[in-house]
Amino acid sequence: MTNGTKDHERWQEIGQQLRVEAVRISGNANSGHPTSSMSAADLMAVLVDKYLHYDFSAPDDPRNDHLIFSKGHASPLLYAIYHAVGAATNEELEGYRTLGSPFEGHPTPTLPWVDVATGSLGQGLPIGVGVALAAKRFDRLESRVWVLCGDSEMAEGSMWEAFEAASHWGLDNLCAIVDVNRLGQSGATRVGWDLGTYTARIEAFGWHVIEVDGHDPAAIDAAYAEAEGTTGRPTAIVARTTKGKGVKAVEDQEGAHGKAVPDWEEAMAELGGDRNITVTPPPPRGEGSVHQFDVSELDMPSWELGEEVATRKAYGEALAAVGAANGKVVALDGEVSNSTYSEIFREAHPDRYVECYIAECQLVATAVGLQVRGWVPFASTFAAFLSRAYDFVRMAAVSQADICLAGSHAGVSIGEDGPSQMALEDLASLRAVYSSVVLYPSCANQTAALVAAMADGEGIRYMRTTRAATAVLYGPDEEFHVGGAKVLRSSDDDAVCLVGAGITLHNALAAAETLAAEGIAARVVDAYSVKPIDATTLREAAAASQNKIVVVEDHWPEGGLGEAVAAVFADSGVHTRVVGLAPPGMPGSGKPDDLLAAAGIDADHIAAAARKLATG
Amino acid sequence: MTNGTKDHERWQEIGQQLRVEAVRISGNANSGHPTSSMSAADLMAVLVDKYLHYDFSAPDDPRNDHLIFSKGHASPLLYAIYHAVGAATNEELEGYRTLGSPFEGHPTPTLPWVDVATGSLGQGLPIGVGVALAAKRFDRLESRVWVLCGDSEMAEGSMWEAFEAASHWGLDNLCAIVDVNRLGQSGATRVGWDLGTYTARIEAFGWHVIEVDGHDPAAIDAAYAEAEGTTGRPTAIVARTTKGKGVKAVEDQEGAHGKAVPDWEEAMAELGGDRNITVTPPPPRGEGSVHQFDVSELDMPSWELGEEVATRKAYGEALAAVGAANGKVVALDGEVSNSTYSEIFREAHPDRYVECYIAECQLVATAVGLQVRGWVPFASTFAAFLSRAYDFVRMAAVSQADICLAGSHAGVSIGEDGPSQMALEDLASLRAVYSSVVLYPSCANQTAALVAAMADGEGIRYMRTTRAATAVLYGPDEEFHVGGAKVLRSSDDDAVCLVGAGITLHNALAAAETLAAEGIAARVVDAYSVKPIDATTLREAAAASQNKIVVVEDHWPEGGLGEAVAAVFADSGVHTRVVGLAPPGMPGSGKPDDLLAAAGIDADHIAAAARKLATG
């Protein structure tokens, strides 16, 4: 018997052990995805025993490899691995899918070895691309990224964004392992066991591809070795496997997805029962430490009061300045950097700019991947097009990710390009993301201060910027913070309070001038932090202006600034009236001023609403 | 001179005419995308003169072909075509990009010849796939679909979902014309003029592919003829073109995207000035009429009061019944039909079920394409995964599309699968879509009634269904309608009003029982129509219960039912207190009841909040 044969036998045993434990974990919970785990058990056995360079006692070691289960529903397999390497006990795994246990139905970073939450298919590979990019281009370490993909998720377009980006970036530290078990949740996949189709597609996207029998340890071993030896491009291992492998009752059967194996204790016996093999993955590679980019002192841009500057431009200038002082900041864009002005960052820090082209899912996924390894990503595109990546943003929150997003060209005020380019739902959709911060500055100096605050923050931080140049309202030393608001205009006899943010704040100020000329004093509040909203300032402002508020936004009436302000007063001890102004119908193309008027959110309409409320 | 040569010269002239007009339209507006129009002018000249079978005087003729500009920013070219065929006058085109003109910056169906709005890249082809499917599988007419794609948008994953779906469905009536001008908005594309890369990728996805010089009318003609003659699979024409073709100042230049050509009147002269060629496209093909599926009388399912039935199951049964009576109804699913229960429809009406696999963008795009040709699509998946297609839903509203969406497995109440599968932002994100209806039934009979209402409605109609079986609360003859609400429990001395919907309504009813035992009478309102919300019923309920409301939802606090109810009272003439209950933090996996309790939205928490409000 050669050493090779011994290895193969050992891997077969490890594979069976992983299967047994996956069956037990899900059987015990009477819930979960054992059959999807069993197909990939041999692939993972070889990987963790020989190729995954990882110190489970030091998950924060930047030299560690990464193992991402893009098919997150195979969590029983992942947790069986954690047990095999000694990171988790059998008792801990008994908590699987029960409240308070970190061993959730799909993996989340409540476990220290999980980089990102998965379970929405088609996300693990795109994020893995971001992690591999971080390791190779930014950290400059030998860390490799291994992503276990399902075959069902190959139908997700985001996978193909990932395949294209990874080859374009030459990520030879990335390996996708495609578990082709031919069966999805409700039936067979389109491609079935036609491995050649997957191979042709992935090769056409610039990868090295290896087809293997996913239950042959020798072939798997050779494939991983070949992946490690491939330079200049990523490798995909397309593995033919059998769902439910090893248990006749469920092997290659439809209707066996997402449920415990029937008679699961007998099934464990069929698999040969418990092994107690301890797996010791190879240690992290190399001795290097994370690359540090040169930095200089923080020197923020500033603008004169009254100067006309678009907040999107201020975003770009501020981000470049923040990036000069903080070498962890990376800018990403969806091929519109000359509109979002992330191009200013790119010109200042070309080695920390990532062009993601018109692939918004990969844009956000790359940002999530970068933050896994400690970078501070700012991803920008038109605010409307961030909606393409909404599921990625939602999942980023489950991943406890710290990312910054910037959306330009919001609202009807963009003008001629028309409604396809007008974000009118971004405030609502991004407020409804856990851990999110939603900022909407109205002035260049304010934008700069908030970009700096975003870089230092946590969670999902979103800034909405404006296409048009608008007047600078605040001096460069004015302080702003997440959760703040500013009173820009007030008197002792305010009859009404106008609340705006971004473009509408300017209209509110103009309306206040009009009202003043009529003898109606209007307080004006800048609610630049849409989430968290500054309830204290708003309550004080309401109390000082007859508890009458007009809130105006360039966004659909639902879920944006208007409802955020209304929510502050929903359970108020004082009767407060909150009148919301927002576009009532689908806008067309036109001059920005014409569109603001048509949407009923220009100064005249604000003044009219305030007049009626104040005198009503 | 042969006839062929004459044709080629004519097409060259038409191409130049289209360029001249694109330059004028955008020059006149000082806005728009002339260079992106000029690259595709020759491709379109040959198409409209010889291959686009379309009667511009009868855009509703179902035998018409379809021309979809997936690169919607090339609207000057599209409008120049409309002029060339006599559908639009020069005077009308002068309205380009001005308020009130249907000639918007990006095409929308405010023009009768535009099927769907484009301008968010990567959507026209997926929707075109849906249109082609409708023509071939459902209408059973010879209508062909021609989609002009940009090369930049080939980076969007949704394009690859479309390529896979179209070949899987054998859509040989579909032709994608890829305008490879090598330049995006801010720089060159990844692939540049490497046509072979596009060809390899598209072929690997199962299409017939033809490479052409996109400025050679003879080659273009031959390619279209080959596309028409290709059976069993769709055809892509990958055309090498030059952006800004014909005007030296902008030809193949970076920095010339999305703006009028400089010195545009001189540029028109450089292009040879005005032609006045009238193009008469060939007439619609064949004589057939739209296929009609057999129908029977409407026989809706019903359930006994108190029976435990999941609303997702009722959705499937009701949809099958509605589909039996209405032959226009088509069900689509994202490979989870055994979870959403659209499988019940599939079993009843297999010829009107469309499996879209795990590709949610294509799922919604297919629905949009089906409604272009008058079908009534119901697209279902887990509510959380509809977020993957949010941009498609947003754009469907710009397209004035009439589609039905159903999202199952919403909220923490799904239990063990954990947060990746829990929609907690769907109500907010879908409320913030223009034209949307958001329904959240709590009982099987109610679900059935609302499914029937959805089929007869307009706009974007969304239903959120529940995983768990819940008690039937209403009899089968109870009436429900979009915009309605029901008072389920009331007395003359109500001290507080509990508002819930879906799963939380059951908890609210249980809380009311608890409170009643303590001598606190609580009114209970079922706000099953989250948008539009029934303001009248809510105001009456508030007035009858001390103007004290507790609203409870299985959704993040932002933008959902709580804020919808709060908005009703924001500008109320009466001081009304609205207390919202919603999950405060990221849930994990667990038993549904444990998770509802942990989220503070079970009966005990509702009772506690109501007790405090009623007695406070």
Image: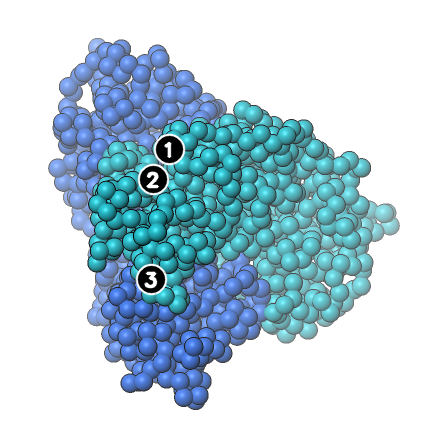
Chain colours: A cyan, B blue
- Amino acid on which the number 3 mark rests in the picture: Thr
Q: Earlier in the sequence, mark 1 or mark 3?
A: 1
Callout 1: residue from which chain? A
Residue positioned 42% across, 67% down in the render: B580
Residue A506 badge? 2
Which sits earlier in the primary sequence, circle 3 or circle 2?
A: 2
Q: Is residue B558 above or below residue B44?
A: below
Q: CA distance from mark 3 to mark 2?
A: 24 Å
Measured Cα–Cα span from mark 1 to mark 2: 8 Å
- Residue under disc 1 on the same chain as residue under disc 2: yes
Q: Give the camera-side residue of A347 and A146.
A: A347
Amino acid residing under circle 2: His
Picture layout, residue A116 above or below residue B308: above
Chain letter for mark 2: A
**Would you name the residue on which mark 1 appears?**
A471
Spatial CA distance of label 1 from label 3 is: 31 Å
Q: Earlier in the sequence, mark 1 or mark 2?
A: 1
Residue B360 location (% of width, % of height): 43, 51
The reply, left or right, for residue A282 in relation to residue B409 is right
Three-letter code for the amino acid on which mark 1 is drawn: Ala
Residue at the spot of label 3: A576
Disc 1: CA contacts within 10 A as few (<14), some (14-19) or many (>=20): many
Residue closer to the observer: A202 or A304: A304
The secondary structure type at the circle numbered 1 is strand
